[in-house]
Structures are given as C-alpha cells and as structure tokens.
Image (cartoon, grey):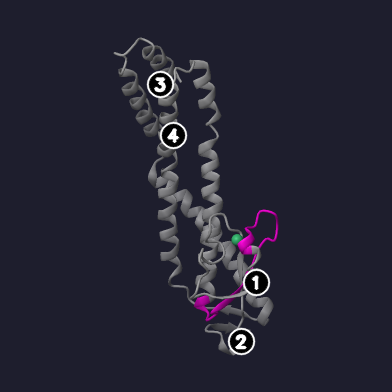
Amino acid sequence: MPTLAGIRADAEDGPAAGAWHTALHEAVIAAVAAATVDAARLRRVIGIFGEQVRAFNGQQFHAVLRAAYGVDIFRAEPGLDALCRVWEAENLRLIQSIAPHYLELLEGRVVAAVQQGRTLRTVTREIRDTYGLPRKRAELIAQDQIGKLNGQLTRYRQQNVGIGQYRWRGAMDQRERDAHVEREGRTFDWDKPPGDGHPGHPIRCRCWAEPVLPSLDDLDALIVH
Ligand SMILES: [Zn+2]
C-alpha cells in the first residue's frame, strides 16, 4: 500500500514517469519474498496433514472389511510411502505457488488501474477486495488434495488385497456434479477409470469407492480371526 501511494503520484507526473512500473514490480518481488514460507517447515506440516488422511483412510478401510467379513484383514502396503511422498511434493508445489500467483494478479490489476487513471482510493479498495483470494485458493487446494489422497489410498488399499472393482458412491447433495450423480451405484474397474478419474480425483470431488468384495477365500491378504 505505501508503494502504491508513491507510484500513483509518480504516474501523474507525465510521460517520463515510467519508473512507477519498476517500483511496482520491485514491491511485488519483495512481497513474494516476504510471503515465502520456509520449505522444510511447510513440508513437515504437509507431512502431518498427509498422515492424518492416511490414518483416517486406513481406519475406514479396515472397518468396511471387518463389517463385511467379520474378521480383521491385513496385508503389507509397501507402495503407500511412495504414494504419500509424491502427494506431499505436489502439495508443496501447489502451496508455494499461491503467493506468486496472487501477487502477479495484483500487479496486473494495479498496472491497469494506474494506466486508466483511477484514483488511489479506488485502487486501494480494489486491492482490499482481493485480500481473501489467497486464503480461498489455499482452502480449495486443501479440500481438493484431501479428496485426491483419500481416493488414491482407497484404490491402493483395495487393489492391494485383490479388490478389482468398486461401486461409485456420492454425497448425493446439491453440490455433486450431475455426471457423478448418474454414476451412483454403478460398478467400475480400478483398471478402467472414467474419463475424469476415479472417485476423489476430479477437482473437489467428494465421491468415494465402495469395494465390490470378493469371497473371503479370494481375498489376497492375511486373515486374522
Ligand atoms: Zn464426485
């Protein structure tokens, strides 16, 4: 905001005032640097977040199997760590992109406002109106990424014990996509995803995959009575 007051005044000085653009760009670069979170710390937070999704998914998975078969079913899950590491790296990239994307958008808006000769008061109000955007973006990423990880863990866990198919299940509320409502109860192969992916993969999809359970003898797992 202080930089903005300065450049708005400069821009009114006439054609020689191109320096305002440089000043603005430098202010944006400084703001990006100030908004950058320590990567190691961010990675730890994302890791804890991922562990929670993983634990929740595991509880749900075992509860479904126990309810269906009346026994506890276990199998080593050697691929889970790699799956979570890939998810963490993608999250780190997405979260680190929030500040630069936001500030780039802000810079574009300020340049347009200055060029159109809008008053400092108007520009300031326009900028204040964008303050909520990074938070909204972070929330969207978090919701979407929880769904994606949960979906990937479900797929891994089901296939790992020899479950080849699932029934599509949705929240069946106003927010669910029409295309997903149409899939309610239909059976899909884990090896043949629909065009937009398995449940949880499409952006902000809250659908889930109910396993089509084989007989206990056909399950590829250790059974504990
Ligand atoms: Zn869905």
Give SS at disc 3.
helix
* Label located before the other in sequence (2 or 3): 3
Give the percent coordinates (x, y) of residue 75: 51, 78
Q: Which residue is mark 1?
A: 63
Look at discs 1 and 4 and give the one toward the viewer. Answer: 4
Mark pair 4, 3: CA separation: 16 Å
Pointers 1 and 4 in contact (C-beta within 8 Å): no
Rendered image: mark on residue 115: 3
**Label ID, residue 216:** 2
Q: Nearer the viewer, mark 2 or mark 4?
A: 4
Q: Amino acid at mark 3?
A: Gln
Mark toward the start of the polypeptide (4 vs 3): 4
Image: 195 above or below 165: above
Q: Residue furthest bottom?
A: 217
Q: Position of residue 173 (x, y in %)?
A: 70, 57
Range drawn in magenta: 159-180
Whether residue 46 sits left or right of residue 67 in the image: it is: left
Which label sits in the foreground, 1 or 3?
3
Q: Earlier in the sequence, mark 2 or mark 4?
A: 4
Question: Does 52 appear above or below 141?
Answer: below
Ligand 1: which quarter?
bottom right
Q: Are marks 2 and 1 in contact (CB under 8 Å)?
A: no
What SS does tag 1 mark?
helix
